C-alpha cells in the first residue's frame, strides 16, 4: 500500500488508511514480529480507531516473517517491562487469569466484523500466535515460502487466541487436531489445498496480489458485501431451512434498499 501518515503507530503495530482500505502492519522484523501483550493491545486499538468508511483491512508483517508467534520473554520470570510475567499470572486468582486472556483475545476478534473484509498477507513463518492472527482474518494470501505451525502444545499450552474455531472450520477436526498436536509445519501447497490459503503467489508478487484482491472487494456495493458476509458466516450454525429464511430476509432488505424504501 502507499505509505501514508499512520493513524496509529505503537508497540510494533502501525495502522494506515488509503480510501476504503486500511493496512495494519507488524513492525518488528528484527524479532520476526514476535508478539507481546503490548502488541495485542495495540492491535485491539487499531480495530477501535478504524475510520467508518474502511471496507477492507490488510494485515501484513514487515521483513521475512509474518510473525514468529509469542515472544518467549513472556515465559521468563521477569516477563516484559511493566507487565506481569505469564508465570505470575498463573499464580494469581483464576478469575483474573481468565479476564487477562479474554483481554488478549480481543486483538484477534475484530477482524471478522461484518462491515469489514480482512486479508492476512503471510510470508515466511506464521507460528503459534502468528498462525492464529492469520486465522483471525477472513482471507489469507500467502507467499510460496510460508510456514504455518501451531506450536503451543509443545510448550505445554493450548491455542487460546481464537485460532481453534477457524482452523477446524477450514480444514476439519481431524486435520486440525493433527496440526495442533504435532506442531508440524504446514507449507504453501497444503495450505492452499486444504483451504487455509485462498491464494499462493511468489513472495515478490504478494503485495500486488493483495492490492488486486482489495480493489475487487471494494468494487462491489458495500451493503451487498456486508449482507453476503453475514449470510456465509452464519451458514454453518443454521439448518438448511434456517439459511433459506436468512437468505430471503437479506434479499428483501437489499431489494427494499435498491428501491429506496425505508422502514
Image (spheres, rainbow, N blue to C red):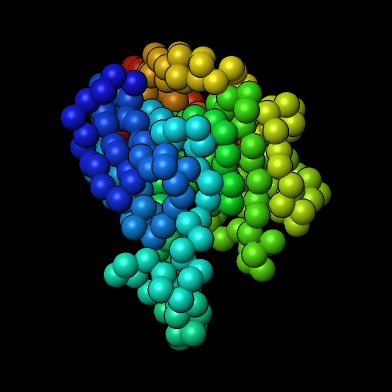
Q: Residue at x 26, y 28 (%)?
A: 17
Left or right of 260: which side holds 60? right
- Image quadrant containing the N terminus: top left
Q: In which quarter of the image is residue 21?
A: top left
Q: Residue at x 43, y 24 (%)?
A: 224
Compare residues 228 and 30 and report the one nearer the observer. Answer: 30
Q: Can residue 83 be seen in this view?
A: yes
Residue 159 coordinates in the image, percent (x, y): 61, 58
Compare residues 31 and 246 and report the one nearer the observer. Answer: 31
Q: Which residue is drawn at 56% across and 60% down?
A: 160
Q: In which quarter of the image is residue 156?
A: bottom right
Q: Which residue is drawn at 71% across and 42% down?
A: 185
Left or right of 156: which side holds 73? left
Q: In the figure, 101 relative to 96: above or below?
A: above
Residue 172 coordinates in the image, percent (x, y): 75, 44
Compare residues 249 and 215 and report the one nearer the observer. Answer: 215
Seen as rendered, the residue at the extreme front is 30
Count numbered badges in the picture. Answer: 0
Q: Is residue 48 visible?
A: no
Q: In the figure, 207 relative to 62: above or below?
A: above
Q: In the figure, 14 relative to 224: above or below?
A: below
- Image quadrant containing the C terminus: top left
Residue 56 coordinates in the image, percent (x, y): 38, 28
Amino acid at each position: 500500500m502507499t505509505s501514508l501518515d499512520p493513524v496509529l503507530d505503537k508497540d510494533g503495530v502501525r495502522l494506515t488508511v488509503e480510501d476504503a482500505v486500511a493496512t495494519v502492519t507488524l513492525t518488528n522484523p528484527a524479532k520476526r514480529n514476535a508478539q507481546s501483550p503490548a502488541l495485542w493491545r495495540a492491535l485491539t486499538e487499531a480495530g477501535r480507531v478504524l475510520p467508518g468508511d474502511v471496507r477492507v483491512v490488510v494485515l501484513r508483517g514487515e521483513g521475512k516473517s509474518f510473525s514468529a508467534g509469542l515472544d518467549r520473554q513472556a515465559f521468563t520470570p521477569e516477563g516484559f517491562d511493566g507487565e506481569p510475567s505469564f508465570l505470575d499470572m498463573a499464580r494469581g486468582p483464576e478469575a483474573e487469569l481468565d479476564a487477562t486472556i479474554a483481554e488478549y483475545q480481543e486483538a484477534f476478534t475484530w477482524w471478522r466484523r461484518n462491515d469489514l473484509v480482512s486479508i492476512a498477507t503471510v510470508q515466511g513463518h506464521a507460528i503459534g500466535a502468528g498462525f492464529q492472527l492469520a486465522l483471525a482474518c477472513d482471507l489469507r494470501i500467502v507467499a510460496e515460502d510460508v510456514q504455518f505451525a501451531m506450536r503451543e502444545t509443545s510448550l505445554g499450552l493450548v491455542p487460546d487466541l481464537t485460532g481453534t474455531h477457524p482452523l477446524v472450520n477450514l480444514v476439519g477436526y481431524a486435520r486440525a487436531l493433527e496440526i495442533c498436536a504435532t506442531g508440524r509445519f504446514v507449507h504453501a501447497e497444503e495450505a492452499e489445498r486444504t483451504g487455509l490459503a485462498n491464494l499462493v503467489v511468489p513472495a515478490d508478487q504478494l503485495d500486488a496480489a493483495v492490492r488486486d484482491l482489495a480493489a475487487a472487494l471494494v468494487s462491489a456495493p458495500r451493503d451487498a458485501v456486508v449482507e453476503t458476509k453475514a449470510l456465509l458466516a452464519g451458514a454453518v450454525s443454521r439448518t438448511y431451512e434456517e439459511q433459506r429464511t436468512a437468505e430471503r430476509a437479506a434479499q428483501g432488505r437489499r431489494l427494499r434498499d435498491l428501491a429506496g424504501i425505508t422502514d
